[in-house]
Image (spheres, helix red, strand yellow):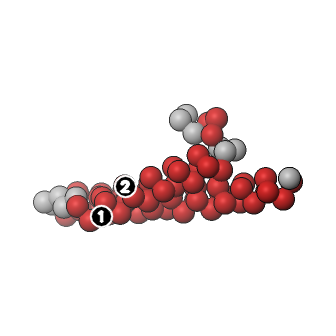
Amino acid sequence: MLLKHRLHNPEALIAVGQLSLVVGILTQRFVHPPTDLWQGFVAGLSGVLIGLSIVCNVRGLVLHRQRRERG
């Protein structure tokens, strides 16, 4: 819901992508849960955030390029 109005704004998508990348990397680096179950959860969460970052950044770059070509 937060991105509903910003899905066609390349700057907003790139900003969300960069934020999710930073949070994903910081989660991998600084969150060390004590049990194997939570370690897997944190690894999965950071993987989802990094994947979301890739999707948002690529989509933002594609939209930016389309706007530049249209004029």
Residue drawn at (19%, 61%) of the image: 32
Residue 15 screen position, x and y as percent: 53, 51
Judged left or right of residue 14, residue 68 is: right
Residue type of the residue flagged with mark 2:
Val
Q: Give the crowd class for mark 1: few <14, some 14-19, many >=20 residues within 10 Å.
A: some
Residue type of the residue flagged with mark 1:
Gln
Observer-nearest of 47 and 40: 47
Can you identify the residue that label 1 sits on?
Answer: 28
Residue 16 screen position, x and y as percent: 51, 49
Asked whether residue 44 appears in the rendered view, the answer is no
Residue found at the very far left of the displayed protein: 34
Tag 1 and tag 2, C-beta contact below 8 Å: no
Q: Secondary structure at mark 1?
A: helix
Residue found at the very far front of the displayed protein: 71
Sequence-first disc among 1 and 2: 2
* Image quadrant where residue 60 sits: bottom right
Residue 56 screen position, x and y as percent: 58, 55
Can you identify the residue that label 2 sits on?
Answer: 23
- How many numbered markers are drawn? 2
Judged left or right of residue 51, residue 23 is: left
Asked whether residue 34 appears in the rendered view, the answer is yes
* Image quadrant where residue 69 sits: bottom right
Q: Give the crowd class for mark 2: few <14, some 14-19, many >=20 residues within 10 Å.
A: some
Rendered-image quadrant of the N terminus: top right
Q: Secondary structure at mark 2?
A: helix
**Closer to viewer: mark 1 or mark 2:** 2
Residue drawn at (52%, 55%) of the image: 17
Residue drawn at (54%, 63%) of the image: 54
Residue drawn at (79%, 57%) of the image: 68
Residue 34 screen position, x and y as percent: 13, 60
Distance Cα–Cα, label 1 vs label 2: 9 Å
